[in-house]
Amino acid sequence: MSNSTPTTDNEKKKIKGGKSQCLPSRVLHIRQIPSDVTGAEVIALGLPFGKVTNFLMLKGKGQAFLEMASTEAAVSMVNYYTPATPHLHNRPVYIQYSNYKELKTENLHNQARAQAALQGVNAVQHGSLAITSALDGEGGHLPSQGSVLRIVVENVFYPITLEMLYQIFSKFGYVLKIVMFHKNNQFQALLQYADAMNAYCAKMSLDGHSIYPGCCTLRIDFSKLTTLKVKYNNDKSRDFTRVDLPFGDGQRTLDASLAATFATPNTIFPSYPGAAGFAQPLGFPQGAGISVPAAPGALGSLTITPSTVSGQIPGVTGIPGNSVLLVSNLNPEAITPYGLFILFGVYGNVHRVKIMFKKRGIALVQMADATQAQLAINHLNGQRLYGRVMHTTLSKYQTIQLPREGQEDKGLTKDYSNSPLHRFKNPGSKNCQNIFPPSATLHLSNIPPSVTVDDLKNLFASKGSTVKAFKFFQKDCKMGLIQLGSVEEAVHALIELHNHDFGENQHLRVSFSKSTI
């Protein structure tokens, strides 16, 4: 190849034919690139597959050439992007092998910006930030803040697990640590990569995308933290470089089989089947959910699709998964089957509850399906209830057996499968769109016109709540928000007052709110 701008006649012929007839080459031809896409964004398409050694941008033609370090890396990139078309600025771009075997761009003066972008990327890949201004000039933003990302997941309709985040973000490099938490009634996570370039690529590729169609949208920024400190390896936090950390609350350390998996930061989770009750991750067209390329040695494409239409909690359609929860560290003096039914009923339809006869601090809760069980774990595990931190996980049992006739039970096992208090009886109900984690602010509805603010404040105070604030909705006085002294107080109040009878068959409905007063 000569030291001149490559002509694209051969490429045009291939475009007309629709399929590339070229043999594999480490130089790739990328076409239909939107005019506002930067060189850094094009280069990022190749980074998960290996080092990008040269780059040529033909701005006016919406085309580019990307040279990978090896033919094997280019083949991996083409094989991935052929069935899963990549998108830049929400428009598809197409990748095929070029006739060229290498790029020579030394004397091409109009390629200064493209070369600056490539040098900036390579600088970070080799641990040097000396050329950060190069990529900044190209319109990119190098992660000078470090390798820690702050992730906010909006509209969390389906459960988000630590394993799921690991699976998605490990496509862009080695994930060292993850910490998940709720803040301002939002699901958030901090995730630390092995280096800053990994974090940059993940942010640029995933920010604004949804894990599931229409919900669980990722908002990603760089954190001000330079490193994460993880004390426990459990379902809320994990340090993948250490297998010796305790589970937390004096519990066991990480399971031995899992510890083997996390022995080095280079290991990847065992093949992740998706959240219980959802379809197994599959590749599908862009726009239906997240589909990202795997880093070399990592797992294949991760895409997660819910098993039913949006707006309805999906049932289990032949997908294995347990719907029985094991709930432990309960306060035996305060807990009742009805209390667990009401609390867990916020996240699905509870069919049965059993408090252990000889161990009153342990209970089983059977949800309608595995998806609802996972949702309850996601929101209630680690929640304080009657002065204790409740542990919620999947049980080994597939169903709760009702006591035989004459068997001593003392009312500790209850069947609620036909209860009128199920919140999700009607497919597409608004209740399915208003599922939030426990919060100090409660949403009240079905308030009779005769009930005043003072009536409601006195009602909640009578159950031991500290009422901080209350307001009716301006457009609908049947609804209001009440802010209590703590999240635990709100949990207790919801159990006590959901379905409270005001008389004349008017019952109060209580839910957790995402808002504050």
Image: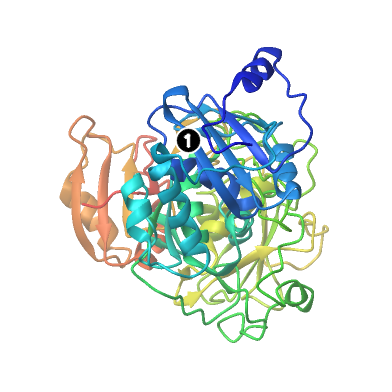
Picture layout, residue 404 above or below residue 238:
above
Residue 365 x %, y %: 66, 58
Dot 1 falls on a residue whose secondary structure is: strand
Front-most of 189 and 334? 189
Residue 254 visible within the image? yes
What residue is drawn where x is 40% and y is 67%? 129
What is the tally of numbered marks visible in this picture? 1
Front-most of 75 and 67? 67
**Which quarter of the figure is the N terminus placed in?**
top right
Is 434 placed left or right of 319 in the picture?
A: left
Snapshot quadrant of residue 325: bottom right
Is 432 placed left or right of 360 in the picture?
A: left
Under mark 1, the amino acid is: Met
Residue 62 x %, y %: 47, 25
Q: Which residue is mark 1?
A: 57
Front-most of 503 and 207? 207
Picture layout, residue 504 above or below residue 239:
above
Q: How is the image coloured?
A: rainbow
Q: Residues within 10 Å of mark 1 (few under 14, many from 20)?
A: many
Front-most of 132 and 410? 132
Snapshot quadrant of residue 362: bottom right
Residue 93 x %, y %: 56, 28
What residue is drawn where x is 50% and y is 72%? 334
Residue 190 visible within the image? no
Residue 397 x %, y %: 79, 60
